[in-house]
Amino acid sequence: MDGVSEIESKVAPPIARCAHCQGMLPLGLGDKTCTLCGAICRVTHERTLIDLREEKITCPKCSTIVIAGTEERPVDLICGSCQSPFRITPKIVKVEIGCPSCDRLLRLKPRPGTRNINCPACKSEFSVTF
């Protein structure tokens, strides 16, 4: 489906921790392999699954409300009114981290492990562990 409108989902799975090392697991639901210790953990969250199935999206062409009806993201849908195809993409989760030097809030995509961050305001470097 080339040239299809893309809409970001409003629902994101929760950030989960490994049961063995307490490190952050890769984002998403299902069986996830911890990048820190290699353990396989099952991530489930019933409320998120319900919210994904029942998510209401406005058609980008005719503004009709379309219910996603599935837990999968990305998902390709076709509007029942205008027959226009569009795609619901997964929500990109971001967290706010305060710079320890200047207290500026930085929005980052969380990834498992430790990251070195350079603050764009004060140019200081600090590390963050998710």
Image: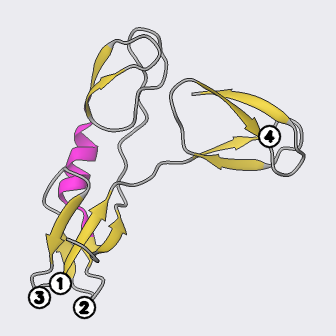
In the image, is 115 to the left or to the right of 118? left
Q: Is residue 18 above or below residue 6?
A: above
Start and end of the magenta stretch?
43-56
Q: Amino acid at mark 4?
A: Cys
Q: From what the image shows, is residue 108 above or below residue 30?
A: below
Q: Earlier in the sequence, mark 1 or mark 4?
A: 1
Q: Quadrant of the image for the C terminus?
A: top right
Viewer-nearest of labels 3 and 1? 1
Q: Position of residue 90 (x, y in %)?
A: 34, 54
Q: Amino acid type of disc 1?
A: Ser
| Residue annotated with mark 1 | 84
Q: Is residue 106 left or right of residue 84?
A: right
Q: Earlier in the sequence, mark 3 or mark 2?
A: 2
Residue at which label 4 appears: 99
Name the residue tied to disc 3: 81
Q: Residue at x 29, y 77 (%)?
A: 3
The amino acid on which the numbered mark 3 sits, given as a three-letter code, is Ser
The residue drawn where x is 24% and y is 62% is 55
Q: Position of residue 89 (x, y in %)?
A: 32, 60
Is 42 placed above or below 78 here?
Answer: above
Whole-number angstrom distance, CA of label 3 to CA of label 4: 48 Å
First in sequence: mark 4 vs mark 2? 2
Whether tag 1 and tag 2 are in contact, CB under 8 A, the answer is yes
Sequence-wise first label, 1 or 2? 2
Query: For residue 62, which numbered disc appears in the image?
Result: 2
Q: Disc 3 or 4, which lies upstream in sequence?
A: 3
Q: Secondary structure at mark 3?
A: loop
Q: Quadrant of the N terminus?
A: bottom left
**Picture coordinates of residue 50, whole percent (x, y):** 20, 49
